[in-house]
Amino acid sequence: MGSKIIKSILFACLFAICMAYLESAIVVYLREILYPEGFVFPLKIVGKNIIITELFREVVTIIMLLSIGFYLGKCRLEKFAYFILAFAIWDIFYYIFLKALIGWPESLLTWDILFLIPFNWIGPVIAPVINSITMIILALIIIVFKNKYLKVYFTLYEWLLLIFGSVIIIIAYIKNSLFFVFDFIENKTNDLSELQTALENFSLEFVPLKFDWIMFSIGEFLFLLSIIIFIRRMTKSKNRKFI
């Protein structure tokens, strides 16, 4: 692997680690204000301004991580690789910094709210850490292969495995909120204002007790299967760049 590639990887990691500290610092402030006794479920009532601010903070965070991919990558696949690399490093170090700053999470099985878009993503800390490790593996494989081969690409079948695996994992995180929405629409009304109020009340009452590890594992399996198939196909390829 060339020195330029190593510098790009280190730059993406450094950027992500700095972002992780900034976000963990914000969470420290929020928890000091909202959860001085410690973060626990169910959630506390917060103002709409805070919720809107958090939603936009999540959107801007993704945009910033995407910008790293567009800046460092030379092609679409490489841009994608640097994006998921930065995303994964950011996610892992977010928890590392929170542990160092406030001693949270207590363990890798501690429950957390991961995202708010489009519904609450809820799961034990170890779940997104596993996802992040998988994304780091995929990102590094793409970057290394791009440095060795003239043509690096994912087939439609490999993309479908990645996408379906990711969707299944996301459903595992949001299934409680998702099932609540379906149940509400079926039994009550599809009025958006009433649904929004019901979702807010649901969030304030919901206490996670069990994570769907079976669904999560299926999603991870499909994701890893795509990586394995990609590696086997690329290593058999004769389209190698000789340096």
Image (cartoon, helix red, strand yellow):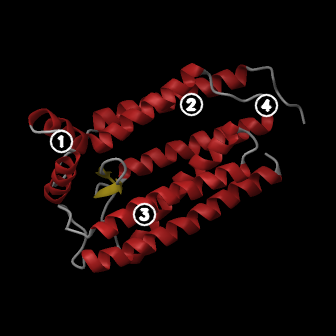
Q: Position of residue 108 (x, y in %)?
A: 34, 56
Quadrant location of the C terminus? Answer: top right
The earlier-in-sequence mark between 1 and 3 is: 3
Q: Residue furthest right?
A: 243
Question: Label 4, on which residue?
Answer: 149
Name which of mark 4 and mark 1 comes first in the sequence: 4
Q: In which image quadrant can residue 35 be found? A: bottom left
Q: Mark 2–mark 4 contact, CB under 8 Å?
A: no
Would residue 220 be visible to someone looking at this image?
A: no
171 horizontally vs 226: left or right: left
Q: Are marks 2 and 3 in contact (CB under 8 Å)?
A: no
Q: At numbered mark 4, what does the secondary structure look like: helix, strand or loop?
A: loop
- The image's mark for residue 95 is 3
**Label 2 element class:** helix
Residue 221 placement: quadrant: top left
Measure the C-alpha gap from mark 2 to mark 4: 16 Å
Residue at figure coordinates x 32%, y 64% from the top left? 51
